[in-house]
Amino acid sequence: MGNQLFQQAREAVQLAEQAAQSEDALSVAKNALSSAYANSTIAEKKQLRELQNRLDNLQH
């Protein structure tokens, strides 16, 4: 089944990217990443860091 929080974080970052820097979408994505990180495997954490980088790039 996989890590549901990881899936939600990935989807939230994708939505934030599509929402053209909507503050609400960015906030949801940040919260999802934070929640997912604590409950993820090492491989998932690497991918979550990459998602965080993508999110950071949206804010610049």
Image (cartoon, rainbow, N blue to C red):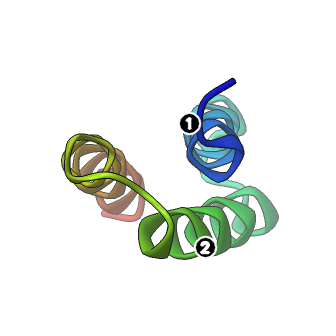
Task: Name the amino acid, label 2.
Answer: Ser
Q: Quadrant of residue 45?
A: bottom left
Between marks 2 and 1, how big is the CA–CA gap? 19 Å
Q: Nearer the viewer, residue 6 or 57?
A: 6
Figure check: 48 above or below 31: above
Task: Name the amino acid, label 1.
Answer: Glu
Figure label count: 2
Which residue carries the number 2 mark?
35
Which residue carries the number 1 mark?
17
Q: Nearer the viewer, residue 24 or 40?
A: 40
Left/right of residue 13 with respect to residue 18 in the rendered view: left
**Which residue lies most toward the front here?**
1
Left/right of residue 47 with respect to residue 5 in the rendered view: left
Q: Residue at x 32, y 52 (%)?
A: 41
Instruction: Report crowding for label 2: few under 14, some 14 to 19, many 20 or more residues within 10 A (C-alpha).
Output: some
Q: Residue at x 61, y 73 (%)?
A: 35
Figure check: 56 above or below 43: below
Q: Residue at x 42, y 57 (%)?
A: 40
Disc ID at residue 45? none
Q: Nearer the viewer, residue 51 or 45?
A: 45
- Please tell me which of labels 2 and 1 falls first in the chain: 1
Secondary structure beneath disc 1?
helix
